[in-house]
Image (cartoon, rainbow, N blue to C red):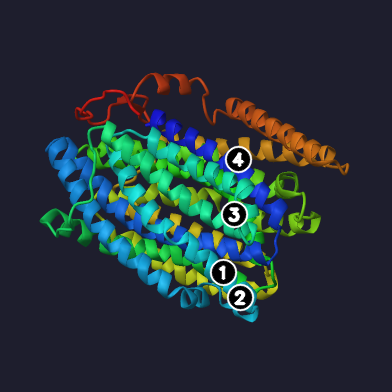
Amino acid sequence: MIRSVLTVGGWTMASRILGFGRDMLIAAILGTGPIADAFFVALKLPNLFRRLFGEGAFNAAFVPEFAGLLATEGPATARRFAQESFGVLTFWLMGVTILGEIAMPGVIQVLAPGFAASPEKFALAVTLTRITFPYLILICLAALVSGILNGMERYTAAAASYVLFNVISIACMLWLTPYTPTAGHALSWGITFSGVAQLGLLMWAARRAGMGLGVPRPRMTPRVRLLLRRMAPGLVGAGVTQLNLAVDVIIASLLPAGTVSLLYYADRVQQLPLGVIGTAVGTALLPMLSRQVRSGEAAAANDTQNRAIEYTLVLTLPAALALVVSAYPIMWALFGRGAFDAESARLSSQALAAYGMGLPAFVLVKVLAPGFFARGDTATPVKIGMAAVALNLSLNVALMAPMRHVGPAMATTIAAMFNAGALAWVLQRRGHLTPDARLNRRVWRMMLATLAMGLALHFTQTQLFAASWNDLTRLLALAVLIAIGLLTYAVATQLTGAYDLREIPRMLSRRRLRGGDGSAINPAPTPPVPTPETTP
């Protein structure tokens, strides 16, 4: 699993770095003004639906079934199931897209009610969202094809496709802006263009892997009906999670102008470790757990879950503390130029610190949920998620006045902690997750190593950012600060025994995990894949 995690994580890291370049340009050109607020709402809506229908409920139901069919009945049956699913999803998404385009003013009224106080801002948000909304059908179909490739343990193309999103967005912002009314229009067109490119790349990769797909007439076959039945609770559960994010936007639109943008920039920073770690581990974990559970390998599945939690914590604990301790230097160095001034950096850093506190919980939700999905249980995460939404909504209302722009971030963090804790408790109670000796031994040592890193960051950044430097110098200072944090944490993990860096080469050299007692755990054999043999 570690090799798959690093493959997905490496491409996700490249995408996030390019994403930072894009966001730095957006901050410099748009800052936290009305055009920025309107664009971020336009970006939020198709992303909400993408996570809801594409990467959320659909993948949770599709990937285990596809991986199981591939392992037990062969590529031909798995391909037929994928083709049937592709046809039904295409038909359904086209309907949603058409309805969304027609009803967009009402949708924006619900998603950003505070925009109604400014007719120009409201009209701009409607226009930009209509431009970006076709991204919904493109990226949801891309998510299905990614699920096919992930089910075949071919992670490269699926992970690399997100790089196209940022490359095309940056190109449109730089070269299309002079030909559009605002930079927000150019960025919005870039979103839709990138969806075309992503879907095209993944369709090509699937065809190379022997899983080429057409667009068949939608047919409700028995397997598709089963897929939809399994999707139903997952759809509610994913909707609950995305409702949490939508609540943040709704509350932010009611706060002073610029709050939507402040939260966006803060969220983008915490999405770097969240995306790299959470997406990588979650993507690699689900197919492996599905095979182990279906093969009756309960002990191997438990060890796989333990190692996934261990990998998650060893990376997210230091990242979370770094986001809290160094929030202002991070925001000022990354975005402090052009329309994004020092006050914007200060305010957004407060939201970043609140998001940072919840980073381990955000990632653990992605790591623990496959423990349910692999066993065909999509209902339990729904129930837990509904409780998390209720908690998030009540906290948003309670905190919006005293904490203003920090309130939505803090509410989301607390809700994520509840969500992760409840998922872990239920898995443990059912006997599907038993923390082994290795995990128990290493967690508290990770905390000690993280504390040492936090102290090093605190004292170092005081010296590095004492002077008022230019853009380049601030970025160099941030790079030095990150290097010091990484070095301190690496040394501290070795001194405390939190992690042995010598394990990494051993993991990379073998496609297997090691259990808490050090014994080799081999995942279920991967079924033969049609030519070409190499991963695209």
Residue lying at 43% horizontally and 31% vertically, measured from the top left? 7
**Residue 66 numbered tag:** none
Q: Label 2: few (<14), some or many (≥20) within 10 Å?
A: many
Q: Tell me if residue 35 comes above or below residue 273 in the rendering.
A: below
Q: Is residue 436 visible?
A: no
Residue lying at 36% horizontally and 71% vertically, measured from the top left? 99
Nearer to us of marks 3 and 4 is 3
Sequence-earlier tag: 2 or 3:
2
**Residue 125 numbered tag:** 1
Q: Residue 236: percent from the left, percent from the top?
A: 34, 66
CB-based contact (under 8 Å), mark 3 and mark 1: no
Q: Seen from this angle, which residue lies furthest right?
A: 467
Which secondary structure, mark 2? helix
Q: Seen from this angle, which residue lies furthest bottom?
A: 117
Which secondary structure, mark 4? helix
CB-based contact (under 8 Å), mark 1 and mark 2: yes
Nearer to us of marks 2 and 3 is 2
Q: Quadrant of residue 492?
A: top right
Sequence-earlier tag: 1 or 4:
1
Q: In front: 473, or 412?
A: 473
Sequence-earlier tag: 3 or 4:
3
Q: CA distance from mark 3 to mark 4?
A: 17 Å
Q: In front: 442, or 77?
A: 77
Residue position marked by numbered label 2 in the rendering: 115
- Amino acid type of the residue tagged 1 in the rendering: Ala
CB-based contact (under 8 Å), mark 1 and mark 4: no
Sequence-earlier tag: 4 or 2:
2
Which secondary structure, mark 3? helix
Quadrant position of the N terminus in the picture: top left
Q: CA distance from mark 1 to mark 4?
A: 37 Å
Sequence-earlier tag: 1 or 2:
2
Q: Label 1: few (<14), some or many (≥20) within 10 Å?
A: many
